[in-house]
Amino acid sequence: MQYQTEHYQAESWGYYMPMRSMHTADPLERVARLASKSAVVIFSLSSCCMCHAVKRLFCGMGVNPTVYELDQDPRGKEIERALMRLLGNSSAVPVVFIGGKLIGAMDRVMASHINGSLVPLLKEAGALWL
């Protein structure tokens, strides 16, 4: 994985990538582009306990997700609304993409973890090597 060092800063659970440099007008297109930049991408709010839990889950598995903290971006509300449309519900975060594919919110991530399908997805995306 290659990262442009001037566009991110390390966080305890992966990489926080500010979206300020992204100039795409359509929020859904922007989500798709951001989601495809890394093996695991989490759209999050820094104050959300469920977001914190999903980030801890991935870090505990040895995965370093790219995290977009929507409350730290001036256009984060637009992205949050686009994520709500993608999910078809009122709870927009956390939203997880693996290998550029939408996995879903916390319930879908945990269901995948419990039923054993999460690890193969992470391996296929190159986020987990064991």
Image (cartoon, rainbow, N blue to C red):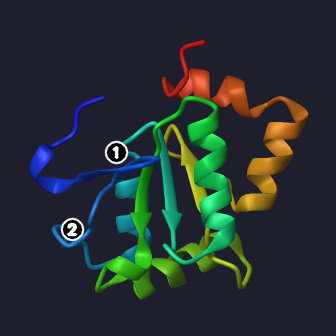
Tell me which residue sits at (72%, 76%) in the image.
88
In front of the other: 57 or 18: 57
Q: Secondary structure beneath disc 1?
A: loop
Answer above or below: position of 100 versus 62: below
Screen quadrant of the C terminus: top right
Give percent across and percent down for residue 89.
Answer: 74, 80
Q: Which mark is residue 15?
A: none
Tell me which residue sits at (34%, 78%) in the image.
72
Give percent across and percent down for residue 38.
Answer: 39, 41
Give percent across and percent down for residue 18.
Answer: 26, 65
User: Label 2 is placed on what type of residue?
Assistant: Met
Identify the image quadrant of residue 57: top right
Identify the image quadrant of residue 61: top right
Q: How many marks?
A: 2
In front of the other: 33 or 56: 56
Callouts 2 and 1 close, C-beta under 8 Å: no
Give percent across and percent down for residue 97.
Answer: 55, 49
Tell me which residue sits at (60%, 62%) in the image.
52
Badge 2 crowding class, 10 Å Cα cut-off, few under 14, some 14 to 19, many 20 or more, is few
Answer above or below: position of 36 versus 30: above
Tell me which residue sits at (65%, 54%) in the image.
54
Q: Is residue 115 left or right of residue 68?
A: right
Identify the image quadrant of residue 75: bottom left
User: Label 1 is placed on what type of residue?
Assistant: Lys
Question: Which residue is label 2 attached to?
Answer: 22
Q: Which mark is residue 37?
A: 1
